[in-house]
Image (cartoon, rainbow, N blue to C red):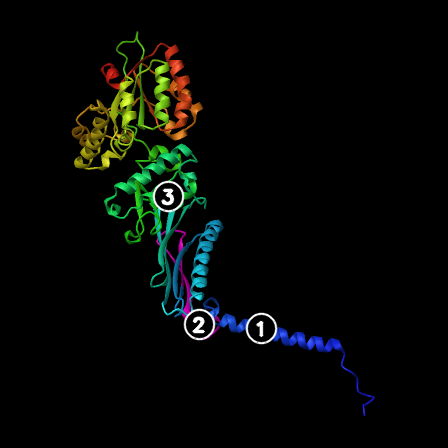
Amino acid sequence: MTNPYRKRRGPWIDLLLIGAIGVLGAIIVFLTFISDDPIFRQTDKTSAKEHTITEEASKFPGIKIVTDQSDDKKMPYTVQYPLTEYEAFNSAVTTYIEQSKQYYISMMRLQQDSKKLTGDLTITVETFEHDHYYSFVLTNNTVLTTEEKQTTIETFLIDYETGDLIDIRALLNEDLASLKTFAAHVQSEMLKNPAYKEYVLEKELAFATEPKWRLFKRFALKDDSLFIYFNEGEVTKPEAGVPVVEIPLSFINPLLASDFQIEMQSETTIIPTDKESSKKRIALTFDDGPHPEVTKQILALLEKYNAKATFFMLGSRAQYYPGLVREVLDSGHELGNHTWSHPVLTKMTPAEIEKEYNSTEEAIIHATGENSTVFRPPYGAINDDVRNTIPCKSVNWTIDTLDWKYRDSEKLFPMVKKALHNNAIVLMHDIHQSTVDGLEPVLAYLQKEGYEFLTVSEILPYH
């Protein structure tokens, strides 16, 4: 018999109880799941000992080094990375670190049942200081199994006065012509480096050094050199390790944005005089070529104005364009030696100076069958060791157009006109399109003013 006083339970109560049981079950499943996740293991006392994060000051002002370490037996890792006072930099670095950790952890989970499970992740950081810039080089060694392992590189360059992150575009002044020349340098240095001779993968290297901004993300400034990094196995066989190309800043100085350039020395070996004031003379000179596009355009303009010039060539470039070297000579211009790799000669031994000179002479002779007739020390840097080692006349300039610095075609003519004097020797560079674009107004003005265009050797007697 039914109790008339007993109330029936409403259906909403049943639904509420079922929902509560479902939520409780979900919580239990979630807690079980994260208890096995190494990221969350610090929730119990044992796991806290397996995962530690520490910070310590570095020897570089304003830079802290963070060490994140997990001793988890299934997926251990030790990660180091820098932190600064700048939020944008910190965000970029920590994003890279977290992505690296998550990739490693996710890959390890896929192999939990593998007998070959011997995973490890190690990220170390090196810091280099150059002027007011810090370069951070992070080396990532990711090991998934005994067969699956790789070393990769990530770099960050920061202006520690402003906090700005610097990429290759800023370094090369966002100049595509400079990028092309730079890319060719990197490829050349890799190919001639004896340490990689047996390991270079030429097709892969050619692809990795195409003149594309995105391909040159890994670099660092150290001392007076730019270091370019490749990942293990990217351009060489894996047994070669991580390939690194070192390029002296002096070698690529004209390609760099002005903030990164090495200052050219002001010393010159020429004191302008005017022995024959009734006749106007000028010597136009072009350094750092030949360039397959720019030099040809300059030759065409010089021919148009019946002007002679002197081309101070780098041996490292002359070797690649022997036909163009010959064309310069056949067009009536003078060939000068400008060293092989554009170093600061005053910092080198006589033997090193001699090698720079002789290797360039060999390239010029190979192209033309003739020696150069004059020499110009890079940056105008000269001392007794240089003078005594170089067997021909060393010649600097009396007008620096600063085309290497401004790379602005509209500045070339005003710079020449402002400093113009008789028997001047004008410094320009045949590797910048902006120099070509600004050259014709200079030639037209000098011709109109009655200047005779001489080579350096021809104008020297008037000094």
Under mark 1, the amino acid is Ile
Check if mark 2's residue and mark 3's residue have beta carbons within 8 Å.
no
**Which one is closest to the eye, mark 1 or mark 3?**
3
**Which one is closest to the eye, mark 1 or mark 2?**
1
The residue lying toward the viewer, choosing from 349 and 293, is: 293
> Mark 1 highlights which residue?
27
Q: Is residue 402 visible?
A: no
SS type, badge 1 = helix
List x then y, in percent, for residue 39: 47, 66
Magenta residues, start to end: 42-68
Identify the residue at the far bottom of this view.
Answer: 1
Q: Earlier in the sequence, mark 2 or mark 3?
A: 2
**Which one is closest to the eye, mark 2 or mark 3?**
3
Q: Earlier in the sequence, mark 1 or mark 2?
A: 1
SS type, badge 3 = helix
Q: How many marks?
A: 3
> Mark 2 highlights which residue?
47
Under mark 2, the amino acid is Ser
Q: Is residue 247 magenta?
A: no
The residue lying toward the viewer, choosing from 332 and 206, is: 206
The residue lying toward the viewer, choosing from 253 and 210, is: 210
Q: Is residue 43 magenta?
A: yes
> Mark 3 highlights which residue?
208
Q: Residue at x 43, y 39 (%)?
A: 169
Q: Earlier in the sequence, mark 1 or mark 3?
A: 1
Identify the residue at the far right of this view.
Answer: 4
- The image quarter containing residue 389 is top left
List x then y, in percent, for residue 453: 31, 14
- Mark 2: give few (<14), some (14-19) or many (20+) Cα within 10 Å: some
* Picture quarter with the C terminus: top left
Above or below for 233 versus 148: above
